[in-house]
Image (cartoon, rainbow, N blue to C red):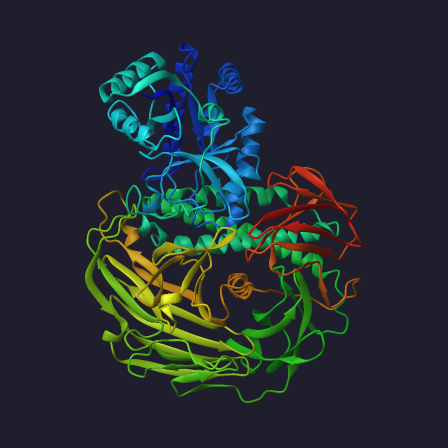
């Protein structure tokens, strides 16, 4: 009979925000950790662990010098372990991959600098899933272990509790699955012990002791007595019982043969249905995406500006990152919280956006002063913030102080480009005061710019609305059903095939499902009461055709609201853009999505979701993605790209995107704003494509759709830079640079990217300015090995889906 070594790990899971706000959490944290510190003083056999900077800092701020020294002593002795290594315990599926990297970069640095703690054990025990890149992100950030609870798929419910968790690039980290959830104590210790023996990888088992806001009040002898009694009643032979930290337990596993799993631990049905969190509080999720995009863009621009001697606004950027990371706590970005928490989070996001705009504006202005715009009356700096060349639509508001009745836009080669006026305000004499317009920017260099210009001209007849239910460009022909205004046909002119199967559902059709007692914590209460868009006939359709775009606009009714939908085909852009507005929405307990029935060979379809720093297959069902989901049958595929509406449901030949959940009169806590009354606007895009699988083109389209080209007006002036240039270029472009930032320490600039197709590559980065030295660094910016500088470039190997960081020093 096997005899077990039982490691009891006391802990307290303290939600940074939930149905309480952060000031209340500080009170809880101080009460919990004060009690833990008392037990550590009184009981030499006691141990404790705690995660999250937000929790630990709240406690540290009120400690006197003596208590601070004692806490640091317990940390150095291994009796108090600072786990997690993150700023908060984040949601894993929704924030971008770089945000997970920054959780650790910011979190571990604070833990080390303030507490003297080397946090090596990841601790995401309450997050709603665990993407496949978690091992790589943890390992490359200097961490060794990982403890989690939720997200194990049904086919692995019998797996071992200890295993090697492996990322697509081969990175591994030693992991423990809390098979019985993270709550443990006298009330359920027998059940935890029984399951521990079932899942044990050997003779060592870990039992959590604690739970939500657990205030420790039992010493080591009492806990040991409870555990031994429970084991005896179960007939489990016990070799030893000790209170320990997670790392102590993991070190005891050294030399044991453990299985390796590379599964997607992101299936939400284990330990309850949490899928509703993908689409709770939808305005918060949209603002989160905007804040992420703007902050990372501002950081890139500020780093590039520093190459020209501009001050790097580290304090502003660090503050914005902390506010963004705070909001990524799983119950904040997951939408499972009170209205007070919601309003505070929205204000925090708005602050991130404001700071990012200010940083980006200063950096672009500084860069523009160095570009030669001589001879141009109204020059425009058009900047591509992504690391691949692109052709896309730009948007700009021009203000004319002189009398201008019409204008054209020219590129850096002096060629006129197509435009579309969206709004024009005139003076009394007929001249333009302000005009909002779009124009086409072609072949913009990666992480670079081109200079365009506005040239006044004699007025010509404006394009007005026209009739029709069909539009087309060189790529597609889109036709609406006249009675409902939904999409009847999308014909791919390049590949000569129909995209949709509209025999039952129509394209872009709204569908709402009534929920019964929906739970803001995530449980779906879907009923068989379904509201179909085509059941609300009668609509008005208008058509607009300009040199840049053709647009169909539909106005009609839908359940609980008025709907306004636009379909846009741009010249030279191979995607189909959509905008749906639910005006004056008053739907009660509705789960609202839109549908694209696809004409694919569904028996052969692979469903690929973009996850943080990865693209990976998933089965049919309701999941959360980053910017896209792509369905491909081996010969043809269709990707649906979102701007913050990350919940997707793929089933029955339909690719669907969830727009929102509306929960009225939620009983769990005060959340009337979760009813989502008001007007909501959603932007998304469809990208049909040929090929045997998800290609870099899908990533390129999705990230381009989410990262708009930046346009800044400037004046006529000389400069040392030409009218078109790239600051950083990458080959192959399938390696996408996502980060350009100043190093945390020293004068280096850190560039980080990922291989987007799953294929190994030799990557070359070329810089527009001379560099003195270059290093491969880990995600914590620690140096790994030097890179040979050839000219102004460096080359390094990269595995499929590997995240690689390079530091260059001028």
Q: Residue 422: in sight, yes or no?
A: yes
Dividing the picture into quarters, in which one does residue 218 lie? top left
Question: 749 or 301: which is nearer to us?
Answer: 749
Counting from the top left corner in percent of width and height, residue 542 is at 39, 83
Counting from the top left corner in percent of width and height, residue 711 is at 61, 65
Dividing the picture into quarters, in which one does residue 608 lie? bottom left
Q: Residue furthest front?
A: 1
Q: How many numbered marks, from 0 up?
A: 0
Question: 384 or 555: which is nearer to us?
Answer: 384
**Is 461 drawn above or below residue 354 in the view shown?**
below
**In the rendered image, which quarter contains the N terminus?**
top left
Left or right relative to 147: residue 790: right
Counting from the top left corner in percent of width and height, residue 384 is at 62, 63
Q: Residue at x 19, y 61 (%)?
A: 528
Q: Residue at x 51, y 53 (%)?
A: 614
Q: Residue 213: in sight, yes or no?
A: no
Question: 84 or 545: which is nearer to us?
Answer: 84
Left or right relative to 262: residue 14: left
**Is 405 drawn above or below residue 13 in the view shown?**
below
Counting from the top left corner in percent of width and height, residue 558 is at 27, 70
Dividing the picture into quarters, in which one does residue 502 lie? bottom left
**Is 248 drawn above or below residue 86 in the view shown?**
above
Left or right relative to 696: residue 656: left
Question: 550 or 58: which is nearer to us?
Answer: 550
């Amino acid at each position: 009979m096997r005899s077990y070594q039982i490691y009891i790990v006391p802990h307290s899971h303290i939600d940074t925000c939930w149905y309480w706000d952060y000031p209340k959490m500080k009170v809880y944290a101080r009460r919990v950790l004060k009690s833990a510190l008392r037990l550590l003083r009184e009981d030499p056999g006691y141990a404790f662990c705690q995660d999250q900077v937000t929790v630990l800092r709240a406690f540290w701020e009120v400690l006197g010098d003596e208590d601070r020294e004692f806490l640091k002593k317990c940390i150095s002795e291994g009796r108090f372990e600072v786990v997690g290594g993150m700023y908060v315990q984040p949601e894993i599926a929704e924030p971008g991959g770089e945000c997970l990297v920054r959780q650790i970069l910011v979190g571990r640095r604070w833990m080390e600098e303030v507490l003297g703690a080397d946090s090596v054990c990841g601790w995401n025990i309450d997050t709603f899933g665990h993407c496949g890149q978690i091992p790589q992100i943890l390992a490359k950030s200097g961490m060794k272990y990982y403890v989690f609870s939720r997200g194990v798929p049904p086919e692995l419910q019998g797996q071992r509790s200890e295993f090697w968790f492996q990322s697509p690039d081969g990175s591994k980290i030693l992991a423990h699955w809390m098979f019985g959830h993270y709550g443990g104590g006298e009330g359920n210790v027998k059940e935890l012990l029984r399951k521990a023996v079932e899942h044990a990888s050997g003779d060592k088992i870990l039992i959590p002791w604690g739970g939500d806001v657990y205030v420790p009040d039992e010493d080591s002898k009492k806990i040991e007595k409870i555990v031994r009694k429970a084991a005896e009643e179960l007939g489990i032979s016990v070799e030893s019982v000790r209170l320990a930290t997670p790392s102590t337990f993991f070190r005891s596993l050294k030399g044991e043969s453990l299985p390796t799993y590379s599964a997607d631990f992101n299936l939400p049905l284990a330990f309850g249905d949490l899928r509703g969190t993908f689409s709770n509080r939808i305005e918060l999720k949209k603002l989160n995406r905007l804040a992420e995009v703007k902050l990372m863009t501002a950081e890139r621009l500020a780093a590039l500006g520093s190459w020209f001697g501009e001050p790097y606004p580290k304090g502003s950027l660090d503050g914005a990152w902390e506010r963004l990371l705070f909001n990524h706590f799983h119950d904040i970005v997951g939408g499972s919280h009170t209205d007070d928490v919601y309003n505070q989070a929205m204000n925090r996001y708005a602050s991130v956006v404001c700071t990012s705009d200010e940083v980006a504006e200063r950096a672009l202005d500084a860069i523009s002063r160095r570009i030669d715009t001589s001879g141009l009356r109204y020059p425009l700096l058009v900047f591509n913030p992504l690391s691949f060349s692109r052709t896309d639509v730009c948007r700009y508001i021009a203000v004319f102080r002189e009398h201008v009745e019409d204008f054209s836009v020219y590129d850096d080669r002096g060629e006129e480009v197509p435009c579309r006026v969206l709004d024009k305000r005139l003076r009394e004499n007929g001249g333009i005061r302000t005009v909002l317009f779009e124009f086409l920017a072609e072949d913009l260099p990666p992480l670079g710019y081109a200079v365009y210009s506005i040239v006044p001209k004699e007025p010509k007849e404006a394009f007005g609305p026209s009739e029709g239910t069909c539009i087309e460009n060189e790529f597609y022909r889109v036709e609406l059903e006249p009675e409902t205004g939904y999409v009847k046909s999308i014909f791919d002119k390049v590949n000569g095939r129909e995209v949709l199967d509209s025999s039952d559902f129509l394209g872009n059709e709204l569908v709402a499902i009534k929920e019964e007692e929906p739970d803001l914590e995530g449980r779906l209460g879907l009923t068989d009461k379904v509201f179909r868009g085509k059941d609300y006939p009668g609509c008005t359709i208008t058509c607009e055709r300009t040199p840049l775009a053709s647009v169909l606009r539909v106005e009609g009714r839908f359940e609980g609201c008025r709907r306004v939908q636009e379909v846009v085909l741009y010249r030279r852009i191979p995607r189909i853009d959509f905008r749906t507005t639910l005006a004056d929405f008053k739907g009660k307990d509705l789960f609202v999505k839109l549908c694209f029935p696809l004409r694919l060979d569904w028996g052969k379809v692979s469903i690929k979701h973009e996850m943080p720093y990865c693209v990976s297959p998933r089965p049919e069902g309701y999941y959360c993605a980053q910017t896209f989901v792509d369905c491909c049958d081996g010969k043809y595929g269709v990707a649906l790209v979102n701007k913050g509406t990350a919940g997707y449901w793929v089933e029955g030949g339909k690719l669907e995107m969830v727009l929102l959940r509306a929960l009225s009169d939620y009983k769990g806590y005060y959340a009337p704003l979760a009813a989502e009354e008001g007007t909501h606007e959603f932007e998304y895009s469809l990208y049909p494509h040929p090929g045997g699988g998800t290609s870099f083109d899908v990533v390129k389209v999705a990230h381009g759709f989410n990262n708009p080209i930046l346009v800044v007006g400037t004046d006529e002036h000389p400069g040392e830079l030409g009218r078109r240039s790239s600051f950083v270029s990458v080959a192959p472009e399938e390696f996408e640079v996502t980060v350009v930032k100043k190093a945390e320490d020293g004068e280096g600039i850190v560039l980080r990217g990922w291989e987007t197709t799953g294929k190994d590559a030799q990557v070359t980065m070329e810089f527009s300015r001379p560099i003195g030295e270059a290093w491969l660094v880990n995600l914590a910016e620690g140096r790994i090995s030097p890179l040979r500088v050839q000219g102004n470039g460096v080359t390094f190997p990269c595995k499929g889906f590997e995240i690689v960081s390079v530091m260059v020093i001028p």
